[in-house]
Amino acid sequence: MLKKSRLQVNSTSPLDKVLSWFEQLHQPQIPKSVWIRCQLALAEGFTNAVRHAHKDKAWDLPIEIEVEVFAESIEMKIWDWGDKFDLEQKIAEISQQVDLESGGGRGLKLMKDIADSLTYSRTPGDRNCLSIVKHYDPIPKAED
């Protein structure tokens, strides 16, 4: 493992706080295109936790985010306190009824397309964990 960090925010925390924290985890061997896609997946996951999982819940409910950077993968986890739902079923429904004119509603599909592994599971204590894993081929270090 190259880097690991955990952040706890609440539903009113701005997305740029999350992205700024994530940026500190960047490693030079991660291809820029992979890093940008992971940034997008993290933004979508956090935004979904705020807009959907924590909708109509107390503003100060914590959202926890953990990122682990490995030599050939990035693993991101987002924990929320929302109701349980079937991720694969929801993605299938979204795929069938995408409204291209809509300003939203495509985040789960986008995360699924970016990730090599995308899961959403109920954890002890009635929390949910969205797990996003992206593998990459590292950029070789330049020789001196």
Image: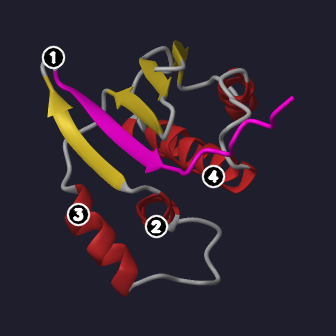
Mark 2 touching mark 1, by CB under 8 A?
no
Precedes in sequence: disc 4 or disc 1: 4
Precedes in sequence: disc 4 or disc 3: 4
Q: Which mark is residue 113?
A: 2
Q: Which mark is residue 22?
A: none
Identify which amino acid the numbered label 2 is placed on.
Asp
16 versus 64 height, above or below: below
Q: CA distance from mark 2 to mark 3?
A: 13 Å
Q: CA distance from mark 4 to mark 3?
A: 23 Å
Q: Quadrant of residue 89?
A: bottom left
Element type where label 2 sits in the image: helix
Residue designated by label 3: 88
> What range of the chain is rendered magenta?
126-144
Mark 2 touching mark 4, by CB under 8 A?
no
Precedes in sequence: disc 3 or disc 1: 3
Identify which amino acid the numbered label 3 is placed on.
Glu
Residue designated by label 1: 125
Element type where label 3 sits in the image: helix
From the viewer's perspective, is 105 left or right of 130? Answer: right
Q: For marks 2 and 1, give the one nearer the viewer.
A: 2
Precedes in sequence: disc 2 or disc 4: 4
